[in-house]
Image (cartoon, rainbow, N blue to C red):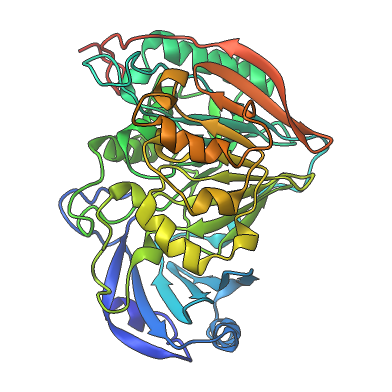
């Protein structure tokens, strides 16, 4: 039986021959595809009515938790039946449906979390150590990012986690102590992580998770792991080795966490904070070559996440989005969905996004790099196009220090700043061993 014989056929559009391997969730696929890989087919010339009909077909075929979500860019439907999960979404601008036989065992019902709680979110740009001359050495790097969001119920939503070279023992201890203070959870009790989101499978975005879970195995209650890493095999073996250590760590240390492969059009709420998925690597796949990942830059596998706070402000999380993604989403995701109050500057300010930043039109920006790194000769003009969109050139913060923000009366205000903890790497590897 083929992958798509286990799910109901899509009722509209024209099916396209060929299947895209969208990758597994936690399985190790370094040696090729696995039984847990999600698979995707195309239908062209589809409509909103076709998606609505498919929701009814899923219900008629015994799928549970069938849910529709629609916005200006996408119309999506999902459902589960035993170990079989299906997600289908229409890209309205192109009339293309991507039908995904999703990761086995996944339940979409776990995606949204607890009811809204009192209080407001706080967003932390956590300080990491960057090479002082924007280069690389055996003990330093010029990239990495780590953001920590405290939701209204004081649980955490974490984004990425920096590079191994930014996770010395001193730096790791600093992270742990900050998380204790930020949540207010005393030693001996578990801190609740409502979701840990990883933008893509590069090593400079995953190390803190690996080190924290392995060093403090009893300190965290991780409820959800959220990402969409492509198949290592399909993207020509370009997922970093550290991403496989991440998967190994998640399998071993948080086996009961819900592992959710994000897809465009997904919409979920955690303690009153709303998240919308605007792009994943699956959007880059073309009907004329449905088995191939076409983009040159692996950074374009970064998932783009739009966050809306309880009071209605929007933060755009771009990960390492690059120009190939920009050219696509500028055509498929309307400007109405890009307008934001705050933007995380993409890819450590290493590339231009001359179309996307004006669409986002944020008043405030956070740069996952040092001040020096943002103002090198090669990066200064890229940063300038972000600053040109800000309400004030001073509304820009770097990761030289830890900065905590809160929206108050529509303004993105600094609650506190803390000095960076940790410098050059001390030789401790991801497993906690000294090299």
Q: Quadrant of residue 243?
A: top left
Q: Position of residue 327 (x, y in %)?
A: 41, 61
Q: Is residue 25 visible?
A: no
At 55% from the left and 81% from the top, the residue drawn is 62
Classify the position of the N terminus by image quarter. bottom left
Vertical placement of residue 52 versus 435, above or below: below
**Residue nearer the viewer, 32 or 96:** 96
**Residue nearer the viewer, 340 or 112:** 340
Q: Position of residue 38 (x, y in %)?
A: 35, 64
Classify the position of the C terminus by image quarter. top left
Vertical placement of residue 369 versus 47, above or below: above
Q: Position of residue 174 (x, y in %)?
A: 50, 12
Q: Quadrant of residue 150?
A: top right
**Residue nearer the viewer, 109 or 12:** 12
Q: Is residue 220 left or right of residue 200?
A: right
Q: Is residue 415 left or right of residue 365?
A: right
Q: Position of residue 192 (x, y in %)?
A: 61, 32
Q: How many marks?
A: 0
Q: Is residue 119 visible?
A: yes
| Residue occupying the far left of the picture | 31
Vertical placement of residue 61 versus 220, above or below: below
Vertical placement of residue 100 versus 413, above or below: below
**Residue nearer the viewer, 211 or 408:** 408
């Amino acid at each position: 039986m083929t992958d798509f014989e286990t799910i109901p056929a899509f009722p509209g559009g024209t099916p396209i021959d060929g299947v895209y391997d969208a990758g597994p969730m936690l399985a190790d696929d370094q040696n090729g595809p696995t039984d847990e890989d999600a698979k995707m087919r195309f239908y062209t010339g589809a409509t909103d009515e076709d998606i609505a009909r498919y929701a009814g077909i899923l219900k008629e075929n015994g799928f549970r938790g069938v849910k529709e979500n629609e916005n200006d860019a996408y119309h999506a439907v999902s459902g589960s039946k035993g170990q079989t999960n299906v997600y289908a979404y229409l890209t309205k601008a192109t009339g293309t449906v991507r039908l995904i036989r999703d990761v086995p065992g996944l339940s979409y019902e776990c995606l949204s979390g607890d009811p809204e709680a009192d209080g407001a979110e706080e967003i932390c740009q956590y300080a990491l150590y960057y090479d002082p001359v924007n280069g690389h050495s055996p003990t330093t790097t010029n990239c990495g990012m780590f953001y920590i969001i405290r939701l209204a119920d004081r649980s955490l939503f974490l984004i990425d986690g920096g590079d191994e070279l930014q996770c010395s023992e001193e730096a790791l201890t600093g992270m742990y102590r900050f998380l204790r203070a930020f949540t207010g959870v005393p030693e001996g009790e578990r801190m609740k992580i409502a979701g840990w989101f990883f933008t893509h499978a590069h090593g400079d975005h995953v190390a803190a998770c690996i080190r924290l879970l392995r060093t403090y195995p009893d300190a965290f209650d991780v409820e959800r792991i959220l990402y969409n890493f492509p198949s290592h095999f399909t993207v020509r073996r370009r997922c970093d080795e550290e991403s496989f250590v991440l998967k190994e760590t998640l399998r071993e240390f948080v086996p009961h966490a819900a592992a959710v492969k994000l897809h465009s059009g997904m919409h979920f709420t955690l303690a009153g904070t709303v998240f919308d998925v605007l792009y994943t690597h699956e959007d880059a796949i073309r009907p004329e070559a449905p088995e191939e990942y076409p983009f040159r830059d692996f950074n374009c596998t970064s998932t783009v996440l739009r966050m809306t706070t309880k009071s209605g402000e929007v933060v755009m999380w771009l990960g390492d989005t690059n120009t190939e993604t920009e050219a696509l989403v500028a055509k498929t995701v309307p400007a109405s969905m890009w307008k934001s109050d705050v933007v995380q500057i993409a890819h450590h300010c290493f590339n231009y996004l001359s179309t996307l930043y004006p669409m986002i039109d944020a008043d405030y920006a956070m740069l996952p790099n040092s001040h020096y790194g943002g103002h090198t000769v090669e990066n200064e003009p890229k940063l300038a196009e972000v600053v040109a969109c800000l309400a004030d050139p001073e509304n820009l913060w770097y990761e030289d220090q830890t900065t905590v923000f809160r929206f108050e009366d529509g303004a993105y205000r600094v609650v506190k700043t803390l000095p960076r903890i940790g410098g050059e790497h001390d030789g401790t590897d991801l497993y906690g061993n000294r090299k």
